[in-house]
Image (cartoon, grey):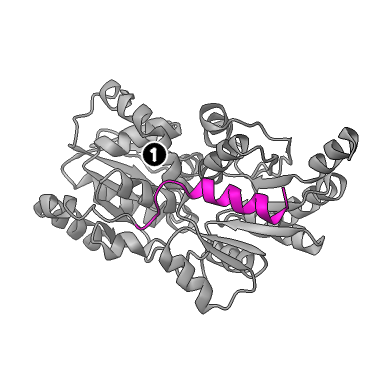
Amino acid sequence: MSETRKKSERTFKKIFLVLGTRPQIIKSVPILQEALKQDLCIQIIHTGQHYDASLSQVFFDELSPSAPLVNLNVGSGSHIYQSAEIMLRLEKHLIMEKPSLVLVPGDTNSAFAGAIASVKLGIDVAHLESGARSYDMKMAEEINRRLIDHSAQLLFAPTANCQKNLQGESVTGEIYLTGDTMYDNFLNFTNQADKNSIWEELNLIDNDYILLTTHRSENVDDPAKLQGILQTVQKAKMHVIFPIHPRTKERLKRSGISFNNTNIRAINPVGYIEMLALLKHAKIAITDSGGLQKEAFWSKTPCITIRDRTEWTETVDLGVNFITDVNPARITQALKHIKENYTEIKSKFRNNPYGDGKASEKIVRILKEKINL
């Protein structure tokens, strides 16, 4: 076979990675790093779903070994608008570049649109973080991940529970229990986080503050809920550090909600390593983020999840993550329980259901096998 022909076939056998949000970048980084080691061509298509630099470019600069091939610049909008625009703008790149396979991470509109556009064009789809279920069909993410899982040819389940969910739904794709690439990433960057001094620069005391994040539409779009969360946390009698998501910041401004002269200190969004550092030194995390629930677990930080259910039930079953929704009484009760039983709760961070830290190595090996490299 001529060298030209070899090069041509090698160029054809590439994978598109379609992403558009901060969590997707984080969970994809170890895949990109491993792909370089195993000589697999993965090209990034950034949808622009997260267009604020603090939620997008900063994570490419900080973590990723690869830059996007293209940015679709979809921006904000309704779920239908984002999904439709991503499919329309992605289509021409799929047709022109002819990837062998499209990899979509997580459960965002970018993942959903990337998967549907690909299968409509006859391109195989691999789903990273497959099988997670909250069983709340009011959540856009739950709808997205179910539709992706039933469209994908390769399903990478991060936990045994996720694998069980997929088997119970009789998905048609091939299921692989791989572990969680976010855990790979945590292990890869934990030493840098240990050396990061952001918590000291903010004059925080180790193991004596709460890390608060909230960004979900059902929490921040309702002024009463958002104010209720903040008022409840103000009563915690602990210092609270609050990296504000741009969406949350805009909702606070629109609603005229203020927490000046309280125990809550707002800061701008931080990078991945800084967030891990803040999480590792916090006594308690309060969040509505799916990813932060897992990162809190790996950091051995008790977590209060201000949602009515979670897709990461493993952390709840282990007794280190407490589901309260935005109910003030339940949040207060959870805070009291954690403080009074702190040593016992900390002892429960033993078994890790998210794999051995080699998920990305397994996934890249499977991808190479499936596209016959």
Residue in the foreground of this view, choosing between 7 and 155: 7
- Find residue 96 and report its horizontal and vertical position in percent: 87, 45
Whether residue 176 is situated above or below residue 299 in the rendered picture: below
Q: Quadrant of the N terminus?
A: top right
**Residue 132 on the magenta span:** no
Mark 1 crowd level (few <14, some 14–19, many ≥20, 10 Å Cα): some
What type is the residue that disc 1 sits on?
Leu
Residue at 43 percent across and 49 percent down: it is 291
Residue in the foreground of this view, choosing between 103 and 237: 103
Residue labelled with disc 1? 187
Whether residue 251 is situated above or below residue 148 in the rendered picture: above
- Find residue 49 and report its horizontal and vertical position in percent: 63, 45
Residue at 46 percent across and 47 percent down: it is 358
Residue in the foreground of this view, choosing between 148 and 29: 29
- Find residue 277 and report its horizontal and vertical position in percent: 33, 32
Q: From the viewer's perspective, tell me whether residue 289 is left or right of residue 142.
A: left
Can you see residue 83? yes
Whether residue 65 is situated above or below residue 282 in the rendered picture: above
Residue at 73 percent across and 35 percent down: it is 69
Q: From the viewer's perspective, tell me whether residue 129 is left or right of residue 270.
A: right
**Magenta stretch?**
353-373
Can you see residue 110? no
Residue in the foreground of this view, choosing between 105 and 264: 105
- Find residue 103 and report its horizontal and vertical position in percent: 65, 52
Q: From the viewer's perspective, tell me whether residue 335 is left or right of residue 109.
A: left
Find the residue positioned furthest to the top: 201
Mark 1 lies on a secondary structure that is helix
